[in-house]
Amino acid sequence: MSLAVAYGALIFGILVWLLLVSRLRAKSWVAVPETGELENERVPPQRIGLWIFLGVVSSLFGLFFAAYFMRMGHDVRATDWHPFPEPLILWLNTLALILGSITMQWARASVAKGDRYRTHAALISAGLLTIAFLIGQCLAWRLMIVSGYFDPGNPAVAFFYVLTLVHALHVAGGLYVWARMLARMRTQVAPSEDIAALEMRRRFRLSVELCTTYWHYLLFVWLVMFALLLTHSIDSQIVFDRLC
């Protein structure tokens, strides 16, 4: 069973990678300029690089989830595995990440229209919500310690920290790219609004689209991870025991 779960995780990562790469054929990023002629339809290398990166990350998280199941024990729970209640702040963190993803989608729609001010406002809002998510994760790690459930010898606690920390590091990497993109936007100077709109679409549309895709992906991974942690928390275990 453990080997089957590991292979399943690898297959999951490959399928996600194939699904993401298949979206390249749609060429939804090709915009029709003012002249009515199509822009260069060649797939941007940055987009290809992002899909490959997401495929690798999917395999990584898939292996982590498989290791979680194997360590916990599938049919018979491991004797040293002790479930614990998840910090309630994780619900607020989830809400912040959802709102950040929605706001990033707003930025994507705004940059497609060449609206510099709404794009800038949406990006700042998305970044602040994502930073709030990371701060909330730090508070959750702290609450685990002060609540008395922190036990280095409990593999359930160790996996909680490993999974959430790896995800937080990927979020922090996204924020680094987000900050650099904002810094470049601040240096943009155009003599008129029309030229500014054209420059916004030409220089930043691809960057915003890639950031939006990455934000949606991080939200998806977190929702899967959060559901996994909740399913095997002590509160859920009590409910299942009563139902059975």
Image (cartoon, rainbow, N blue to C red):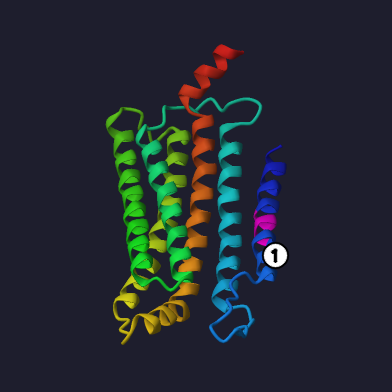
Q: Residue at x 41, y 48 (%)?
A: 99
> Alpha-carbon neighbours of circle 1 within 10 Å: few (<14), some, or many (≥20)?
few
Q: Where is residue 196 in the image (x, y as percent from the top left)?
A: 37, 81
Of 111 and 206, the residue lying toward us: 111
Of 218 and 99, the residue lying toward us: 99
Q: Is residue 137 magenta?
A: no
Can residue 94 be seen in this snapshot? yes
Give the prevailing secondary structure in the magenta stretch: helix
- Left or right of 40 on screen, residue 176: left
Q: Which residue is drawn at 56% across and 87% down?
A: 35
Q: In which quarter of the image is the N terminus?
A: top right
Location of residue 53 with respect to 138 vertically, above or below:
below
**Magenta stretch in the rendered image:** 13-17
Location of residue 191 with respect to 53 vertically, above or below:
below
Q: Quadrant of the C terminus?
A: top right
Can residue 166 be seen in this snapshot? no
Q: Determine which residue is flagged by label 1.
A: 22
Q: Position of residue 43 (x, y in %)?
A: 62, 78
Q: Which residue is drawn at 44% across and 40% down?
A: 160
Of 87 and 77, the residue lying toward us: 87
Say what amino acid the circle numbered 1 marks. Ser
